[in-house]
Amino acid sequence: MKTCPNCGTQMADDAKFCESCGVSLEQGNPGIQGAQPVDNNQSAAQSGPIPAQSGPMPAQSGPMPAQMPPAQTQYNPYQQYYNPKDHTSEFDVRDIADNKLFAAFAYIFGVLGIIAALLVNNSPFTRFHAKQAVKLEIAAIVLVIPAVIPFLGWFVTCAGLLVLVVVKIIAVVNALNGKAIEAPIVSEIGVFKG
């Protein structure tokens, strides 16, 4: 068996050229001493598709080139979809776990829930949700004002309060899931921003 001095591929004794890199294997050929290593990927791209070989692949006698494993990245949902209204990362995980029930009370029980949330353990997480609940309570008071106008005002008040109930449900679910996300719709209004 002959071994190619350029790429290390083994082949039959009567072979005159390496099947892998194309270097001449004749003893007196000066091309062996001056042979440059061939990049198989580059030569394949230049010459077109490589014809399929019949028979087993020749064994490599030289060291195998080290291949780098693919980089593994950990999935982080906040990295891909950043939500400026989500302040969950600003709070301590322990604080969230201990006080998420009190944070939900701020939405469920109105003014009494807000007071309870503010008095609990001096928790920043419950204070955040108490602040959001205050916004919703103010919005509810503002929505009652158009009710003094017959028919159209009643419709506006009913529709607004229905939307507010949905927003409160979303806020309660967020609080129970340990998320500190600003109340939807209400936080978009200029007076309630921040």
Image: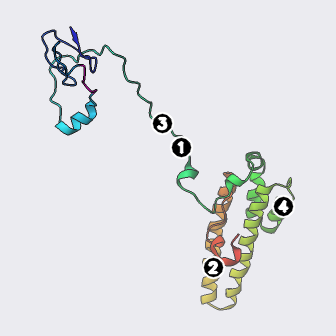
Q: Are marks 3 and 1 in contact (CB under 8 Å)?
A: no
Task: Give the numbered dot on residue 118.
Answer: 4
Q: What is the distance, in whole Å, between disc 3 and disc 1 at their CAs?
A: 13 Å
Instruction: Please indicate whether residue 144 sits to the left or right of residue 185 in the image.
Output: right
Amino acid type indicated by mark 4: Leu
Query: Which mark, by number, is residue 71?
Result: 3
In front: label 3 or label 2: 3
Asked if the stretch drawn in magenta spans residue 182, the answer is no
Residue type at mark 3 is: Ala
Mark 1 / mark 2, whichever is N-terminal: 1
The majority secondary structure of the magenta stretch comes to loop
| In-front residue for pair 54/169 | 54
The residue drawn where x is 15% and y is 19% is 17
| Residue at the spot 21% in from the left edge and 23% down from the top edge | 20
Could you classify mark 1 by the number of other residues whose Cα lies within 10 Å: few (under 14), some (14-19), or many (20 or more)?
few
Q: Are marks 4 and 3 in contact (CB under 8 Å)?
A: no
Earlier in the chain: of badge 3 and badge 2, it is: 3
Q: Which residue is mark 2?
A: 158
Q: Is residue 22 visible?
A: yes
Q: Is residue 15 above or below residue 102?
A: above
- Between the residue at mark 1 and the residue at mark 4, the CA separation in whole angstroms equals 35 Å
Mark 4 nearby-residue class (10 Å; few <14, some 14–19, many ≥20)? many
Q: Which residues are magenta?
A: 33-37
**Taking 1 as reference, is 143 left or right?**
right
Farthest residue to the bottom: give it: 149
Mark 3, mark 1: which one is toward the viewer?
3
Sequence-first tag of 1 and 4: 1
Which is more foreground, mark 4 or mark 3? 3
- Quote the CA–CA distance across marks 3 and 2: 55 Å
Q: Amino acid at mark 1?
A: Tyr
Q: Mark 4 to mark 3: distance in Å?
A: 46 Å
From the image, state whether disc 1 or disc 4 is nearer to you. Answer: 1
